[in-house]
Image: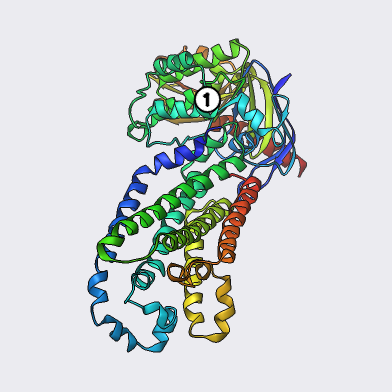
């Protein structure tokens, strides 16, 4: 059976998605084109004199390796910017998926059809996967394109690993937006809940480098599993993927359970 | 068999009033009006039938199916028009109707085209560029286009101009003539009077009365204004059966009339009448009627 709800969601967001893709592609091109000049500059020595707390927050001295393409991309793209951009796009989708449709009133029109609520959530989840996947693919392709031009030597496999990790991370926060929207029907809360959690997850990973008692807690942060261990240089253990996959799947499942039970008040 | 039957249907939630112990039966093949002021519980009831809301207690049976367990099958067999409907408005009317048709596994294309033509819908403009009335027409068509056995229409005529309202009423009559049932909510007595075979009235979540349209019309209150050329005796008018709330403004007499208009007209005819206006029965007045009945009962008990 055709995924008609997925199709509607993607078609209606077509323009936004193209805008996101162009923006991300442009950012990747811009950022990578600086690499040769950074590599040959004295920035590496300047970083050595940064306060150690600052370095610790961003993942220790290893996080500031500007001499290799991998190290550079890790700092400039994969530690925060790319995951954050993908996450924002995913949250935007997740907010619109249920809370947005309910606030606008189109959910009534949709659910009056012979379709289960479960299926509606599932098709929306597929649409969000397509959206996040497409944007992660843009990052992947643009870096492959830029690689020879600026001599990044990043490696296709590690690049794919890092992009997939960022995509799963973003998807999980998008799913949280859907869940919050399913539970509250409020676009504001659907936006605020995952945004706050992303911020908290980011801070926990950074502060864990400074405050030793926080260290165990970083395991609770999805950001740690997706980006905390420098996937571009080191790859990503299967366990990390399992955690990220499990988190995404559990959040979508929770969304189904919550949405099926919810009274849809107009 | 009843197209819709509710038994002791109760829904309480939040600050909204919901519905209380609603026993409703809508005979198949009729146009059934569900009448009540805004906030009375009409939309709540309809949303329970659609399984958007789950009853606190009681049952709702639609086309012989349980509203909760068989919601997908019910949706397959009904057409629904939400109150103040929101449409996916970035696409054209035709694209929206096509898409909704595909969600239902295909529609009768010639019938859909006939409906589009009948309601003079511009199918090729993005919906967001259309006026409210034109959007409402698309919403009406999507409810009818798959020839459902039961139509559940929440305030269907709001936003439609009189000509389109007439077309809508014709469509309802044709639809029931072919065996389907139309269940529509309204807060406009006039509309229900002209269109519906049966009427149920709901107020503050409770069913007030189920009776045939003529009986309601007979009890309905009309606002009558008469302008006289000469003097007249207001007390004589106030003494007539069915007349109340008499006020006088110079040569103009205002009153409310329920029931037969004949005594009033005969009395007025003894004077020189410059102008006479009888406003269509107002639902608020009709409800005032019920309120007063209830309050006097309450007063008698004290």
Quadrant in the rendering for residue B28:
top right
Q: Chain of mark 1?
A: B
| Mark 1 lies on residue | B143
User: Residue at the location (49% across, 29% down)?
Assistant: B100
Q: State the residue in front, B59 or B31.
A: B59
Question: Can residue A55 be seen here?
Answer: yes
Q: State the residue in front, A220 or A163.
A: A163
| Position of residue A220 measured from the top left corner of the image (x, y, whole percent) | 58, 71
Asked if residue A122 lies left or right of residue B21, the reply is left
Quadrant (top left, top right, bottom left, bottom right) of the N terminus of chain A: top right
| Position of residue B142 measured from the top left corner of the image (x, y, whole percent) | 49, 25
Question: Can residue B276 be seen here?
Answer: no
Looking at the image, residue A144 lies above or below residue B72? below
User: Residue at the location (51% across, 71% down)?
Assistant: A224
| Position of residue B95 measured from the top left corner of the image (x, y, whole percent) | 41, 28
| Position of residue B131 measured from the top left corner of the image (x, y, whole percent) | 35, 31
User: Residue at the location (32% across, 66% down)?
Assistant: A152
Quadrant (top left, top right, bottom left, bottom right) of the C terminus of chain A: top right
Color style of the picture: rainbow
Looking at the image, residue B174 lies above or below residue A14? above
């Amino acid at each position: 059976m055709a995924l008609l709800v997925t199709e509607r969601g993607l078609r209606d967001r077509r323009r936004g998605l193209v805008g996101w893709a162009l923006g991300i592609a442009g950012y990747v091109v811009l950022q990578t084109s600086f690499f040769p000049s950074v590599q040959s500059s004295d920035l590496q020595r300047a970083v050595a004199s940064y306060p150690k707390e600052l370095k610790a927050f961003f993942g220790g001295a290893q996080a500031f390796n500007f001499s290799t393409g991998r190290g550079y991309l890790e700092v400039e793209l994969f530690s925060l910017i790319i995951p954050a951009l993908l996450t924002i796009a995913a949250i935007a989708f997740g907010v619109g998926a249920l809370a947005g449709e309910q606030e606008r009133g189109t959910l009534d029109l949709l659910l009056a059809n012979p379709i289960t609520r479960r299926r509606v959530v599932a098709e929306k989840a597929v649409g969000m996967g397509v959206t996040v996947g497409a944007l992660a693919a843009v990052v992947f392709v643009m870096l492959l394109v830029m690689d020879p031009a600026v001599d990044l030597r990043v490696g296709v496999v590690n690049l794919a690993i890092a992009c997939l990790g960022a995509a799963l991370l973003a998807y999980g926060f998008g799913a949280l937006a859907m869940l919050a929207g399913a539970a509250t029907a409020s676009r504001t809360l659907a936006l605020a809940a995952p945004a706050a959690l992303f911020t908290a997850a980011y801070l926990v990973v950074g502060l864990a480098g400074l405050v030793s008692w926080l260290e165990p807690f970083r395991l609770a942060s999805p950001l740690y599993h997706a980006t905390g261990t420098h996937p571009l240089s080191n790859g990503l253990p299967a366990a990390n993927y399992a955690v990220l996959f499990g988190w995404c799947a559990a959040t979508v499942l929770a969304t189904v359970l919550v949405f099926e039970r919810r009274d849809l008040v107009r | 068999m009843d197209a819709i039957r509710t038994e002791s249907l109760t829904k309480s939630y939040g600050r909204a009033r919901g519905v209380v112990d609603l026993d409703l039966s809508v005979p198949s093949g009729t146009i059934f009006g569900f009448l009540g002021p805004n906030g009375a519980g009409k939309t709540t009831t309809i949303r329970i039938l659609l399984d958007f809301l789950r009853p606190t207690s009681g049952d709702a049976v639609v086309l012989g199916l349980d509203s909760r367990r068989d919601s997908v099958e019910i949706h397959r067999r009904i057409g629904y028009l939400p109150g103040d409907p929101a449409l996916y408005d970035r696409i054209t009317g035709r694209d929206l109707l096509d898409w909704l048709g595909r969600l239902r596994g295909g529609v009768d294309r010639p019938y859909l085209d006939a409906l589009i033509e009948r309601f003079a819908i511009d199918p090729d403009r993005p919906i967001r560029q259309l006026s409210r009335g034109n959007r409402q027409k698309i919403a009406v068509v999507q409810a009818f286009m798959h020839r459902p056995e039961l139509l559940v229409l929440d305030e269907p005529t709001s936003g439609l101009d009189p000509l389109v309202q007439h077309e809508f009423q014709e469509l309802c009559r044709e639809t029931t003539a072919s065996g389907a049932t139309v269940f529509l909510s309204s807060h406009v007595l006039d509309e229900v009077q002209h269109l519906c075979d049966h009427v149920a009235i709901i107020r503050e979540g409770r069913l007030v009365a189920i009776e045939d349209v003529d009986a309601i019309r007979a009890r309905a209150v009309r606002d009558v204004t008469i302008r006289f050329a000469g003097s007249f005796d207001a007390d004589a008018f106030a003494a007539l059966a069915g007349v109340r709330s008499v006020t006088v403004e110079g040569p103009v007499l205002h009153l409310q009339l329920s029931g037969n208009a004949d005594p009033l007209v005969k009395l007025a005819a003894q004077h020189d009448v410059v102008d006479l206006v009888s406003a269509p029965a107002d639902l608020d007045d009709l409800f005032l009627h019920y309120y007063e009945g209830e309050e006097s009962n309450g007063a008698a008990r004290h």
